Image (tube, grey):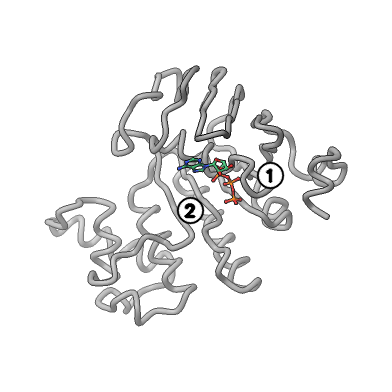
Amino acid sequence: MLEFRDTITTRGDFTLRADLRIEPGLRVAIIGASGSGKSTLLSLVGGFLTPDQGRILWNGQDITHLPPGERPASFLFQDQNLFPHLTVAQNVGLGLRPDLRLNGAQQARVSQVLDQVGLDGMARRLPASLSGGQQSRVALARVLLRARPILLLDEPFAALGPALKTEMLDLLSDIADQTGATVLMVTHDPRDARAFATETVLIQDGRADPPTPTGPLLDHPPPGLRAYLG
Ligand SMILES: Nc1ncnc2c1ncn2[C@@H]1O[C@H](COP(=O)(O)OP(=O)(O)OP(=O)(O)O)[C@@H](O)[C@H]1O
């Protein structure tokens, strides 16, 4: 279980408070207006930010001050953080060893996850020679390989068209099923939240609310969310 215990985080004039729990294996959407603190919440889990007060726990362990590399989390950004000078296989292999000295078994595992995300035959290509959807698949293959218990996604597929986005969300669901990961996904699109997330954390007025079931929240949004959804 992921817990925010009375955290208070300030960034300039902005303050975000969070006191909530997320059950293991849950898929959660993070929604809220622009600038409400969605990326801030993810950064607190990923270790890129530390709260001024309060604690963050994973399965009872205090991770508040752990550096990002020691957190139980993988991060997927919109730009997919691929290295342009590395091949598809190397970009994925980074998930296992940052120095890319993979042994035979590790190389075989890279091929296996590339197959799983539909990129067989593309191992030696460079990211620039791939479509946007294929680049997303490379990033997902790396996530699959790392198999961290928490997956943090900051609008990962916002640049893709609707059909491709649905395809990627389905693939992400499969990966979450396979790894049993707890997934926190920032999205501006309520359809993504409905399609992917069992529960949703709403951020408004400087506070991240505990997760509530996505369907009822979007069917009967509180006034602030209704204004945001339009
Ligand atoms: N490095 C920073 N220094 C000062 N203030 C910051 C910094 N980064 C973010 N902020 C402020 O923190 C607040 C929350 O930012 P955050 O990026 O978490 O919002 P968001 O909900 O993810 O926004 P968006 O939907 O536009 O991406 C904003 O008011 C922003 O101006």
Q: Amino acid at mark 2?
A: Ile
In this rendering, would 220 be left or right of 130? right
Q: Quadrant of residue 191?
A: bottom right
Instruction: Give how far across and how far down residue 173 sits, in percent.
Output: 56, 54
Most foreground residue, 184 or 9: 9
Q: Is mark 1 within 8 Å of ligand 1?
A: yes
Tell me what residue is drawn at x 68 percent, y 44 percent.
Answer: 32
Nearer mark to the viewer, of 2 and 1: 1
Can you identify the residue that label 2 sits on? 175
Instruction: Give how far across and how far down residue 46 sits, in percent.
Output: 41, 38
Q: Secondary structure at mark 1?
A: loop
Badge 2 vs badge 1, beta-carbon distance below 8 Å = no
Q: Count the marks: how many?
A: 2
Can you identify the residue that label 1 sits on? 32
Residue 44, above or below 21: below
Instruction: Give how far across and how far down residue 66 sits, in percent.
Output: 33, 28
